[in-house]
Amino acid sequence: MAVFKNLSIKNKLIIIQTTTAFIVVLVCCIFFVLNDIRTFKDAARLKMFSLARIVGENAVSTLVFLDQDAATQILMKLNKEPDITQAAVLDKNGKLFASYSRERTGSDKDPSAAADGKQLIVSYKLYQEKEFMGTVVLHAELNELNKIVTGYIKVTVLVLLAAITAALLLSAFLQRSIVHRLLKLVSKTKEIARTGNYALRVEGTGNDEIGILSGGFNNMLEQIENMNKFLKESNKALKNYSLSLERTNKELEEFAYISSHDMKSPITSLIGMLTLIQQKEAVQPGKQHLFELAVNSARQMQKTINALNEIIAFRKTLKVEREKINLEEALEEVKLRIYDMISSSGAEIQADFTGCRFVHYPAVHLKSIFQNLLTNAIKYKQHGHPPKIDITTSCEDKFLVLEVKDQGMGIDMDLYKDKLYGLFQRFHTHVEGSGIGLHMIYSIVESYGGKIYIESEVNKGTTFKIYLANGPL
């Protein structure tokens, strides 16, 4: 079946048609042969019965007078019939009265024996004035049957060969109207696949199934051509828009950088002057609260400008080369950076990297992820409880899954779910912070083909599940 499946439609049609013709002709030949054999046997049986009747009528008187020699002489006349091999006359008691056999070597068969496939036995009962006198039994071999069967086999073979030849020629002629059109369709499909030219069409569709298929194929090509044109125009527009957006973003980024850089000095000078005024006690006693508001606003503006500078500098470091990093060593380096914070808070950090010890990632960004997660967990701990942080890793497909779990204040996910990764987003205002930590983690992970999930519950803690793409993009 596998070989037939891989054949061309032309060869499949030829095989189907010739096989069908072969089976039909073979069945017809078998039917005619069997019918002729049956007719031959019926004719032979009728002839034997007539001979038996003639012999029986001549042999009745021999049974009446018990003249065995005369009965034998009557049977001997059957030697003119070449098919009769044995004949016998039985008396009323079924005993042998007279016999004849074409074979003289003593190989006479029992007259009452059953006939096999090549023999025919006929018996005829003898009566004299309604009195049963005996039976005539004739044995014949159907010698002509073998010749007839052999002849039929030869004729059948010749008929089958002629039928197959005619079927091949006819199928080769008729299938051209089917296969030729299918081959044109296949050829056009290959040409379109090779050139990508969807403006091509199949000619001569017609009204049959192949015509409907060709017409549908042409309609599909027309739709694909229109869609392809639309996609090319859309891609061109998107490309131009992307370039424009990239230029705009770059200009905005440069503007933000220049603005924040230019504003940094005046804000520093302003805070210095305010500090100097405070040291000189030049503020009127009744205006002290207003002065403190001005100082706090200036310092908050300075923090915002510093955070903006940090974000701009951070974005310029994205897409750096990956390297093989030992997670345990990277974590220890980060812990040394924030040693004072860990020590003063009494934080307990437990790390288990047995699931996956190494990752191919930019070192500076992996350490930034560790540092932001640890500092956030320490800053937003529950009041009166030292921070407890659990870090584990595992491997899933092409990702290293970094899971960081704390028992801190948690985040109200119903309230802040859509604002988790926004810039300058803060969820707890009683602790100082810039609101850029989660934004930086999200930007790093997304830039290198990863993803991040957060599960959190107020006063129960937060779990960060970060999928780091472990290898080149």
Image (cartoon, helix red, strand yellow):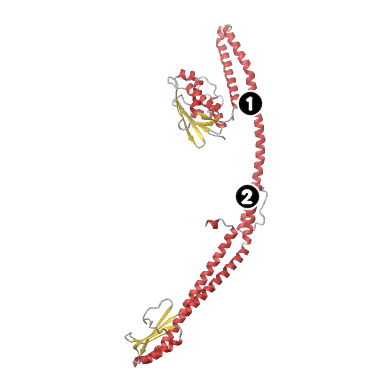
How far across and down, in percent of the image, does residue 248 sit?
A: 66, 29
Q: Which amino acid does label 1 sit on?
A: Glu
Lower position in the chain sequence, tag 2 or tag 1: 2
Asked if one can make out residue 453 in the rendered structure from this viewpoint, the answer is no
Mark seen at residue 374: none
Farthest bottom residue?
A: 65
Q: Is mark 1 on a helix, strand or loop?
A: helix
Determine whether, in the image, residue 246 is placed left or right of residue 423. Answer: right
Q: Which residue lies furthest to the front in this view?
A: 105
Q: Nearer the viewer, residue 410 or 167?
A: 167
What amino acid does circle 2 point to?
Met
Task: Find residue 220 and name its label.
Answer: 2
Position above or below: 80 against 421: below
Is label 2 in a helix, a strand or a loop?
A: helix
- Image quarter of residue 437: top right
Snapshot quadrant of residue 64: bottom left
Question: Toward the viewer: 178 or 241?
Answer: 178
Look at the image and tell me whether residue 63 can be seen. yes
Vertical side of 3 occupied by 409: above or below: above
Local crowd size for mark 1, using a 10 Å CA cut-off: few (<14), some (14–19), many (≥20): some
Residue 323 picture quarter: top right
Residue visible at 54% across and 64% down in the picture: 19
Q: Position of residue 296 (x, y in %)?
A: 56, 15
How many callouts does the rendering have? 2
Residue nearer the viewer, 295 or 115:
115
How far apart are the two marked residues, 2 and 1, measured between alpha carbons? 47 Å
Q: Residue at x 67, y 38 (%)?
A: 236
Asked whether 334 or 329 is in front, the reply is 329
List the residue tagged with mark 1. Answer: 253
Residue 48 x, y percent position in the rendering: 43, 84
Residue in the picture at 62% in, 20% down: 260
Residue 33 in the image: above or below residue 303: below
